[in-house]
Amino acid sequence: MRILPMDGSAAAQVAALERETFSLPWDEPSIRAELDNPLSLWLTALDGGTVLGYVGSQTCFDDTDILNVAVRPDCRRRGIAEALMRELERLLPLRGAERITLEVRASNDPAICLYEKLGYAQVGLRKGYYEKPREDAIIMQKELAG
């Protein structure tokens, strides 16, 4: 497995994984637009030409927001999401980021456990943030070592 910045060749697979994973997925044109956004950094975990997972982020000044993290269902529990997050955390300070913030469904225990393992702390709650189904989001944040 290699972790690389996402390029256009991965956009269709990332969009397919979005549809498989999220109730309100990003479409392929929106994902492709992120490739031209200077504030964005999207990474893919690749096995040859197959996308195993990805993470998308946007950085404004010293704050980074995680947009989405997903791993193919048949590849979960293999450390792919952790590897993607660790590589993102390694690269973001080079872009001036000092902290990362993300939202996670309150019921998504595996993701919450991963983020806590990586040093993220719960800093707030967004009531009714998610749709399909309606659910609260836990806001988590981590300070990055510069």
Image (cartoon, rainbow, N blue to C red):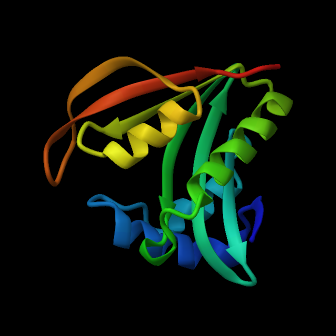
Give the farthest residue toward the bottom.
Answer: 49
Could you tell me which residue is drawn at 49 percent across and 42 percent down? 114
Observer-nearest residue: 95 or 91? 91
Q: Name which residue lies at 38% across and 48% down.
A: 110
Residue 98 location (% of width, % of height)? 71, 19
Residue beneath the point at 80% across and 39% down: 91
Residue 112 falls left or right of residue 28: left
Quadrant assignment, res 136 = top left
Across the whole image, how many numbered discs are drawn on residues?
Answer: 0
Q: Nearer the viewer, residue 79 or 70?
A: 79
Residue 72 image position (x, y, % from top left): 48, 72
Name the residue at 34% across, 17% down.
124
Is residue 87 placed above or below 52 in the rendered structure? above
> Up-down: is 96 above or below 1?
above
Give how far across and how far down residue 109 sits, in percent: 32, 43
**Displayed quadrant of residue 93:** top right
In the foreground, 117 or 56: 117
Front-most of 90 and 63?
A: 90
Q: Quadrant of the N terminus?
A: bottom right
Image quadrant in which the C terminus is located: top right
Left or right, 109 with respect to 28, comes to left
